[in-house]
Image (cartoon, rainbow, N blue to C red):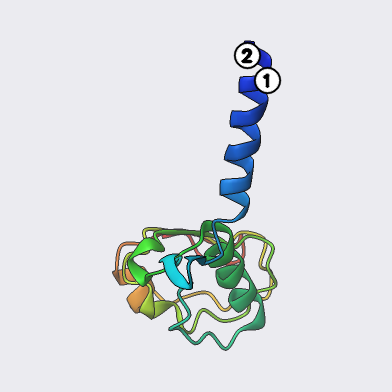
Amino acid sequence: MSIIPRIIICTTAGILVNACADYSFSVNERVVYNPDPLFTDYQIPDPGLQRCVRRFIEQQKISSVSQVQELDCRDSDIVRLDGLEVFVSLRYLNLEDNGELSCPPPDSPLVQSGVNLVLPQHCPSR
């Protein structure tokens, strides 16, 4: 067998395995692989922030709160930051271009935790 068919077979196998990463696999009715469920144990009342967090969790296949270390929520129509306190491992949060955002006060837990915040222009710099 020449090298080209081998490359095609290996590439196809890799694509199939990657495409099926979110599915459980069974052999003889026994589950041999079951992916971790996505992290859902959070409540965020702001619809823009909720969409941003959900999109990040789905794209990165986040299964535990400690895996959320950075969020890029620029231009997400965010008004409030309530609900982020559950993400204790968060180290970077980009909130640029959220014109209606209520700026977090200097004594807020989010600011005090040392998260690297990138705030909209209307918020005072820290």
Q: Residue 47 carries which label?
A: none
| Quadrant of res 74 | bottom right
Q: Name the residue nearer the viewer: 81 or 12.
A: 12
| Quadrant of res 5 | top right
Amino acid tagged 2: Met
Helix, strand or loop at disc 1? helix
Q: Name the residue nearer the viewer: 48 or 59.
A: 59
| Above/below status of 3 relative to 13 | above
| Quadrant of res 102 | bottom right
Q: How far apart are marks 2 and 1 (CA)?
A: 7 Å
Which quarter shows the C terminus?
bottom left
Q: Name the residue nearer the viewer: 120 or 87.
A: 87
Marks 2 and 1 in Cβ contact (< 8 Å): yes
Residue located beneath label 1 in the image:
5
Where is residue 117 shown, x and y percent of the image?
45, 60
Where is residue 42 shown, x and y percent of the image?
45, 83
Residue at 37 percent of width and 71 percent of height? 65
Where is residue 69 shown, x and y percent of the image?
39, 59
* Res. 101 visible in picture: no
Front label number (2 vs 1): 2
Tell whether 78 sits left or right of 61: right
Amino acid tagged 1: Pro
* Res. 54 visible in picture: yes
Residue located beneath label 2 in the image:
1
Residue at 60 percent of width and 38 percent of height? 13
Helix, strand or loop at disc 2? loop
